[in-house]
Image: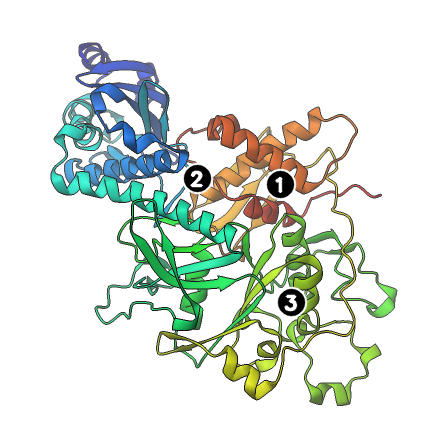
Amino acid sequence: MNTLHNLLASIADQSFQNIRKLAGSYHFPGFELGFIKIQGSPGANPASIAAVKITLQDSAIPKEFFQSAECKLAVADFLIRRFRHGIDRFARQNRGKDGSGSFNTIALSQKMLNRDSVLFDDQAVYLRFIISLPAKGQGGVFDAEQAWIMLSQELTAIVDATFFYHRYDLQTRALLRQFVDVQKTRAEIIQFMRRHALVAFIANDAKLPRHSGVDDRPSPCESVKAFHSPASLQIDIALADGRSLSGMAIKEGITCITGGGYHGKSTLMQALLAGIYAHIPGDGREYVVTREDAFFIRAEEGRSIRDVDISPFINNLPNGLGTERFRSDNASGSTSQAANIVEAIESGSRLLLFDEDTCATNFLVRDELIKKILDAEQEPIKPLYSTVRSLWKKHRVSMIFVVGGLGYFLQKADTCLLMDNYRCDDITAKVRDRLGPIAEEDAPLTDFSVSRRLAIDNFDPAYINRRLNKTLTQRIKDLRNAPKQLEYGMDLVNLEAVAQIAEAPQILAIGYCLLALRNKLKQSGDKPETIRYWIERLEDEINTHGLDILEPDYPGILSMPRKYELAAAINRIRSLRIVQE
């Protein structure tokens, strides 16, 4: 600590770039501080990255909280949020020139995700955080006095409140246990779902509505109605600690959710989409659990499509254009939705979710009136309505639909749910009574083509700035004003339509996954492999060794996406090259 104080004093009031001399590690009472990445300009974005190290013995967090990977993830999530709370409580922010002189963490959603901000080994816990050291004056010289206050007083207070279990009050200890319990209970729910062929579970008393369409926190409205399962679909899950959890089970197959406008259909769908992740205590959706491979399908006009076999859904296009290897730089609503289905199945998903509000109507159905006007040979689209039972029976693809104006899909559903003023009713028997038995399909869906194989020269990260006549060897950048867009090399990858990306750091992680995949492709020789092969190989390595294998320029700022979002990103790269077989 004295070493750091002396070093700060030696560069006081000097050019801000001299702070790079701080690189290294310094001992503080109870922890070690290290600077990983230091930016040489005030208020730089991204800012500098530092880390604190605390021994597990000094932290004294009970060993029972580290019994499984899920429990460790819960502790890590608790600690980064606790650190964020400490910043808000103890730190004076933006004290210097250009907003410098601040602490920060990565953006955190309501979900518990695998991040590289908190790491454990057998002896210690490491937490990486964002720090902007302070500058002052017109020229922006280094403010050593304020930097010392930040590190010796504020950071010390933040670390003391974050890591040391014996300093937690009873409420904080209880909250940590709740984080771990959520993960343990969720793991038991997932095991139950696998044994009983369920695709989703929604616990009774879950609070599903959100703060707003752009704010994922629970709705602050006191009149929010808690979810309660219809009696016919309610199950009880016996937990290892002797408790049981009651709620609604959705079985594999075809499920339709219907109801009037503003009655909760889309709210239920959004909860199901988010149920692929664990949620923090108090979120209201802690025990809404959806099978891990669930993927939301929507129309996506203008997207790029590369050599996707959409012929099971669209064929005989005008001018003899084939659809077995369909390519487009500006896809229509129907062709994009067809490609999204095929790509999701290709990546391994067997649970697809649809909301009619975001679908291409002509891809979903052809009604009787249009059939009287257009002959079958004039319509290249085989509507999804005519294929859903085949997708389920032949390919074991379960589907969940939200429909408010298209009753056709109720004719195909194994389970029909009605949302009425946020109350969920099972109307399956009523639907069968009024519409007759499930409408099976006469012609089975044709087989999908063999999975596409990646050319070796994909995912070039180099960026050519033609205006400045300058080439960067690597550009991987998320856009601050467009949080679901990724700049990768010369490509702008638009992921706005990929609904299950939970937080911005996942976008950046996708970029570094692409870079890791490029390195693997270059080392693979001449044998091309499928998109799914490469993604699952990378996923296995990350699960074994952690996100650090991605070697980001700024460690500590990544959140891991699922393999399905990574596949979606690959499929939206306009420069994507598929091996022609």
Q: CA distance from mark 1 to mark 3?
A: 26 Å
Tag count in the figure?
3
Question: Label 3: how many residues lie within 10 Å, few (<14), some (14-19) or many (20+)?
Answer: many
> In the image, 303: left or right of 102?
right
Question: Label 2: how many residues lie within 10 Å, few (<14), some (14-19) or many (20+)?
Answer: many
Looking at marks 2 and 3 on the same chain, the residue that comes earlier in the sequence is marked by 3
Question: Label 1: how many residues lie within 10 Å, few (<14), some (14-19) or many (20+)?
Answer: some
Looking at marks 2 and 1 on the same chain, the residue that comes earlier in the sequence is marked by 1
Label 1: which residue?
490
Label 3: which residue?
333
Please state the horizontal and vertical placement of residue 309, each as a whole percent of the image.
76, 56
Identify which residue is drawn at 78% across, 52% down.
Answer: 449
Q: CA distance from mark 2 to mark 3?
A: 31 Å
Looking at marks 1 and 3 on the same chain, the residue that comes earlier in the sequence is marked by 3
Three-letter amino acid code of the residue under disc 3: Gly
Between 347 and 492, which is closer to the camera in this rendering? 347
Identify which residue is drawn at 40% across, 42% down.
Answer: 113
Element type where label 1 sits in the image: loop
Say above or below: 514 vs 147. Answer: below
Label 2: which residue?
559
